[in-house]
Image (cartoon, rainbow, N blue to C red):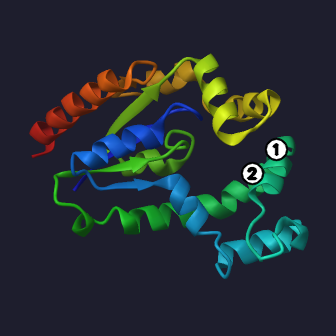
Amino acid sequence: MNIVGLTGGIGSGKSTVARMFGDLGVHWVDADDVAREVVEPGTPALVRIAEHFGDEILTSGGALDRARLRDIVFQQPEERAWLESLLHPVIRDELIRQLNPENGQLPYALLVSPLLLETDQHKLVDRIVVIDVPREVQLERTMARDTNSREQVERIIGAQMSRKDRLAQADEVIDNDRPVDDVTRQVRKLHERLLLEFG
């Protein structure tokens, strides 16, 4: 089973493009979904987070208060480093489990991850596909979607790999600052090429 990594900055449309691949029968695993799963109530990772940050990091229902945690880690780099050292290995193991070839019928599966290139997740993939949009589009989409302030979104973009560096590592680029029909065409062409290459 070949693994294709799909990445892009916040607000670039990773989930939308992943669903387009899914519509073509491609099995895909979203690292953001896995990142949520590994900190659900009762998981060892959530216990460690609560021990480190205190119970005020939990909601009244015992779930992780993501907004509060995000505020802390994006203002305190050392806390972000601690959190990443805890979660990245746990997320990686779960990604490998979910990308198991038994889960798909095609010769490749898709790993969708915003941090594909910033973590060792890129070592799991055979190809890197970058979804690219201009920075201003990232800002507008993310503010509209998450009701975050511009300042908060700027901080998140600043903490991610630069657009230039991301594009430099791409094997393929999907331009998602285009009409949806055009993006769908780009996905279909790439899918057909990958089937030929990996089939």
Please state which amino acid type lies under the numbered disc 1: Pro
Quarter residue 5 falls in: top left
* Image spot of residue 58 (x, y percent): 82, 70
Quarter residue 174 falls in: top left
**Residue at the spot of label 1:** 77
User: Is 51 placed left or right of 157 in the picture?
Assistant: right
Classify 10 Å Cα crowding around label 1: few (below 14), some (14-19), many (20 and above): few
**Residue at the spot of label 2:** 81
The CA span between labels 2 and 1 is 6 Å
Residue at (64% x, 78% y) in the render: 43
User: Is 23 placed left or right of 78 in the picture?
Assistant: left
Residue at (29% x, 56% y) in the render: 27
- Decide: is 75 above or below 154: below
* Mark 1 element type: helix
User: Is 153 placed left or right of 108 in the picture?
Assistant: right
Classify 10 Å Cα crowding around label 2: few (below 14), some (14-19), many (20 and above): few
User: Is 43 placed left or right of 188 in the picture?
Assistant: right
Contact? badges 2 and 1 (CB < 8 Å): yes
* Mark 2 element type: helix
